[in-house]
Amino acid sequence: MSGVNGVSGHPPAAEAYLRAATWPLPRAARQEARAELLAYLWQLRLDAEVRGLDPEAAWRSALEEAGPAWRCALGLARVHSLGTVRAALLVAVALGGAAYAVQRPDGPPALPVTGTEGRP
């Protein structure tokens, strides 16, 4: 992980982690989630430096401590797209209920008569 990106201040491995962790997100949520994740990685890096690691080793430690990018991606996707999934589910249920209500304009079907009415 040699070298640090001069523009962003973080190494290419951190950039790859950010890309891998945020790719499944909707475009609108990706930038905000990326900024939050980068801040988290920086904090992990600073914590590692306080423990005595040099900056390069601190970045390696931060990325290891953050865990696999795929696990982070799943968590971020769950948080940032659950509202969309929930809304789609509610719309589907509402449309299904409406379709059921209009399929029988004459009301519910009559119950069959068995001839046992009036018996104790």
Image (cartoon, grey):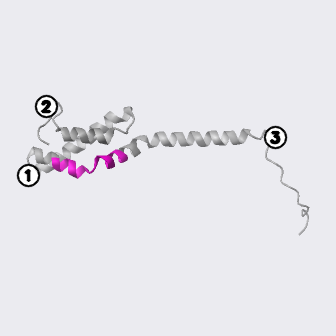
Q: Residue at x 50, y 43 (%)?
A: 86
Residue ID for mark 3: 106
Query: Relative to 99, is 7 above or below?
Result: above
Picture layout, residue 99 above or below residue 111: above
The label nearer to you, 3 versus 2, is 2
Residue type, numbered disc 1 = Gly
| Residue type at numbered disc 2 | Gly
| SS label for mark 1 | loop
Q: Quadrant of the C terminus?
A: bottom right
Indicate the amino acid at tag 3: Asp
Q: Earlier in the sequence, mark 3 or mark 1?
A: 1
Magenta-colored span: 60-75
Which structural element holds mark 3?
loop
Q: Are marks 3 and 1 in contact (CB under 8 Å)?
A: no
Q: Which mark is residue 115?
A: none
The foreground one among 19 and 84 is: 19
- The first of marks 2 and 1 along the sequence is 2
Q: Are marks 3 and 2 in contact (CB under 8 Å)?
A: no
Whether 67 is among the magenta residues is: yes
The residue shown at (47%, 39%) is: 84
Task: Place residue 73 in its image quadrant.
Answer: top left
